[in-house]
Image (spheres, grey):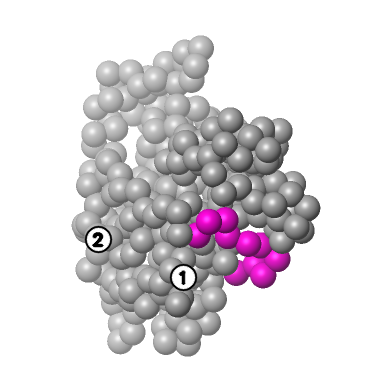
C-alpha cells in the first residue's frame, strides 16, 4: 500500500475510535458505511492485529487498538502540520481553512463579510463546518473553532473575541393578539416555543426554562432555523440570539432591559496551526470582525 492509502486507513481508524461506530465515522468522513468497514478490515490485515471488538452499543478498542490510537494521534498531528506548512508557502496565503461554527454564526454574522475576505485573500478557500458543531480540531475536522460558553476540553490556543446576546422574541402579530408578559406569573398565559434534542442540553435552554417555568409549551425545536420560522408564524415566544432576532422587523424583543443574557464567544485553533499563514489569516480576520461587530453580536440597544 502507498503512503496516501495508508493515511486514509489510519484516518478512518481514528474516526471509528472516536465515534464508536462505522456509520457515525462515515458521516464524519463523508464515506459510506461499507467503505469504513473495508478500511478497518484492510488496516487489520496489514497490521495483522484485531483493532476493534464489536459490542452491543458499538465498537471498542482492543489493547492493540489502544496502542495504535496513541501512535495514530501523533501521525495526525504531524500530517496536519505538514499539510498546512506546505499550503502556506508562496507570496500570498493559500490553502483550505476549515472553520467549525454554529450555523447561525456562519449565516448571520460571518457570511455577509465573505466577499470582502475573498477580495483580500483570493487564494484562501474557507469551509464552514456547521453540521457537527463544535467539530474536533485535534481530529482534523476543523482548523479553527468558534465556541460559545467556554474553550472546551481540547488543547487549543485562542481567545475570547466578543459576547453573544440572547433574548426573548415574539412576532408583532402575536403581541397584538396576546400581549406580552411583564411579570413572572404572566408567562402561564403565553405559549413558549421550546427546545429538544441537543439544544435541550445547552445553557440557553436552562436559562429559558428558568425564566418561563410554568408556561405551556406544545412545540419544541432542535434547530434555530425552525424556532425562527415558528416564532415568525406567531406560534409563541422563543429565545433567539439578538443578532438573529433584531434583524427581523416583524419580531419584537420582550422586556429588553430585563430578559437578556449573554455568553462569551471563543475563537480557537490548534497550536501547531495557529501561526501557519492561511489559518492565521482567517483567525485574525474573524477576531477583527468580532471586535468590529461587538455591539451587533451582543444585541446592544442604542439610545
250 sits to left or right of 279: right
Label 2 element class: strand
Q: Main secondary structure of the magenta part?
A: loop
Where residue 271 sits, quadrant-wise, is bottom left
Q: Which mark is residue 3?
A: none
Q: From the viewer's perspective, is residue 21 above or below residue 92?
A: above
36 sits to left or right of 176: left
Q: Nearer the viewer, residue 237 or 143?
A: 237
Instruction: Assign the N terminus to one quadrant of the image.
Output: top left
Q: Measuring 41% from the left and 59% from the top, which residue is drawn there?
A: 164
Where residue 280 sits, quadrant-wise, is bottom left
Mark 1 sits on what residue?
A: 301
Q: Position of residue 134 (x, y in %)?
A: 42, 48
Where residue 270 sits, quadrant-wise, is bottom left
Label 1 element class: loop
Q: Nearer the viewer, residue 214 or 25?
A: 214
Mark 2 sits on what residue?
A: 159
Of discs 1 and 2, which sits in the foreground? 1
Q: Are marks 1 and 2 in contact (CB under 8 Å)?
A: no
Q: Measuring 31% from the left and 65% from the top, which residue is drawn there?
A: 161
Magenta-tinted stretch: 247-256
Q: Measuring 69% from the left and 52% from the top, which residue is drawn there?
A: 179
Q: Nearer the viewer, residue 158 or 6?
A: 158
Amino acid at each position: 500500500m502507498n503512503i496516501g492509502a495508508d493515511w486514509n486507513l489510519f484516518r478512518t481508524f481514528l474516526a471509528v475510535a472516536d465515534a464508536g461506530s462505522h456509520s457515525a465515522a462515515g458521516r464524519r468522513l463523508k464515506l459510506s458505511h461499507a467503505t469504513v468497514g473495508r478500511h478497518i478490515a484492510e488496516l487489520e490485515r496489514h497490521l495483522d492485529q484485531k483493532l476493534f471488538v464489536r459490542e452491543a452499543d458499538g465498537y471498542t478498542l482492543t489493547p492493540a487498538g489502544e496502542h495504535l490510537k496513541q501512535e495514530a494521534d501523533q501521525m495526525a498531528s504531524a500530517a496536519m502540520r505538514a499539510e498546512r506548512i506546505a499550503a502556506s508557502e508562496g507570496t500570498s496565503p493559500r490553502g483550505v481553512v476549515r472553520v467549525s461554527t454554529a450555523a447561525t454564526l456562519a449565516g448571520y454574522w460571518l457570511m455577509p463579510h465573505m466577499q470582502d475576505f475573498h477580495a483580500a485573500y483570493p487564494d484562501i478557500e474557507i469551509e464552514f463546518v456547521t453540521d457537527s458543531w463544535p467539530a474536533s480540531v485535534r481530529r482534523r475536522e476543523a482548523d479553527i473553532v468558534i465556541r460559545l460558553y467556554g474553550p472546551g476540553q481540547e488543547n487549543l490556543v485562542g481567545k475570547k473575541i466578543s459576547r453573544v446576546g440572547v433574548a426573548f422574541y415574539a412576532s408583532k402579530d402575536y403581541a397584538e393578539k396576546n400581549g406580552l408578559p411583564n411579570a413572572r406569573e404572566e408567562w402561564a398565559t403565553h405559549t413558549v416555543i421550546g427546545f429538544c434534542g441537543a439544544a435541550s442540553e445547552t445553557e440557553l435552554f436552562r436559562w429559558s426554562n428558568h425564566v418561563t417555568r410554568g408556561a405551556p409549551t406544545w412545540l419544541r425545536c432542535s434547530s434555530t432555523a425552525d424556532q425562527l420560522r415558528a416564532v415568525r408564524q406567531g406560534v409563541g415566544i422563543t429565545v433567539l440570539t439578538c443578532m438573529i432576532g433584531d434583524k427581523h422587523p416583524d419580531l419584537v424583543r420582550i422586556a429588553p432591559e430585563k430578559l437578556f443574557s449573554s455568553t462569551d464567544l471563543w475563537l480557537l485553533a490548534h497550536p501547531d496551526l495557529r501561526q501557519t499563514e492561511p489559518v492565521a489569516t482567517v483567525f485574525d480576520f474573524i477576531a477583527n470582525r468580532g471586535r468590529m461587530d461587538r455591539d451587533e453580536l451582543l444585541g446592544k440597544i442604542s439610545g
